[in-house]
Amino acid sequence: MLRGMARSLVVKATSGTEAPERCSQAFTVAATAVAGGVATSLWLTGESAWFALPGRAATFELEHAAPLADLLEAILAGGTVTLCTQCAVRRGIGPDDVIPGIRIAGASTFVEEALQDDAQALVY
């Protein structure tokens, strides 16, 4: 675990291909936390909601950045990934459409996670 901390990290990704550096940063930070043994939750909101669909992360490209599909796979393997309910509905994405392991949940769940003792929330 990073520096022996028993904290959790909640990362909210709010952008997709329209802001690739911000999007990549959210996934990179979440994957790094998972690799460091930190309990990590990544939230896909706004345009990042599209990455909950199979194959979408593989289409993302950003020079000098780790492949988004690899980062997402690592986060799914060791943390949780949640697609925002409203963001999903606005884009016509249903529970049967998303990558296995990704859940759909709303703001109350995000707030609950972010307000846990020793939790740190970051929004990108």
Image: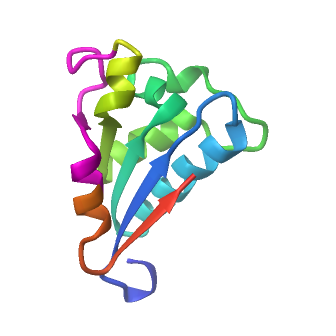
Question: Does any portion of residue 18 appear in the rendered image?
Answer: yes
Front residue (pair 12, 70): 12
User: From the viewer's perspective, is 29 left or right of 76?
Assistant: right
The residue shown at (34%, 24%) is: 88
Q: In the rendered view, how is the structure colored?
A: rainbow
Question: Magenta region: which residues?
Answer: 93-110
Find residue 15 and report its horizontal and vertical position in percent. 58, 37
User: From the viewer's perspective, is 118 left or right of 74?
Assistant: left
Question: Does any portion of residue 69 appear in the rendered image?
Answer: no
Q: Is residue 120 magenta?
A: no
The residue shown at (29%, 47%) is: 107
Find residue 55 and report its horizontal and vertical position in percent. 46, 18
The residue shown at (38%, 77%) is: 1
Q: Is residue 75 above or below residue 83?
A: below
Q: Is residue 64 above or below residue 36?
A: above
Total number of numbered discs in the rendering: 0
The residue shown at (46%, 27%) is: 51
Q: Residue furthest bottom?
A: 4
Image quadrant assignment for residue 49: top left
Front residue (pair 47, 97): 47
Find residue 10 and report its horizontal and vertical position in percent. 38, 60
Front residue (pair 18, 67): 18
Q: Is residue 25 above or below residue 88?
A: below
User: From the viewer's perspective, is 103 left or right of 32?
Assistant: left
Image quadrant assignment for residue 66: top right
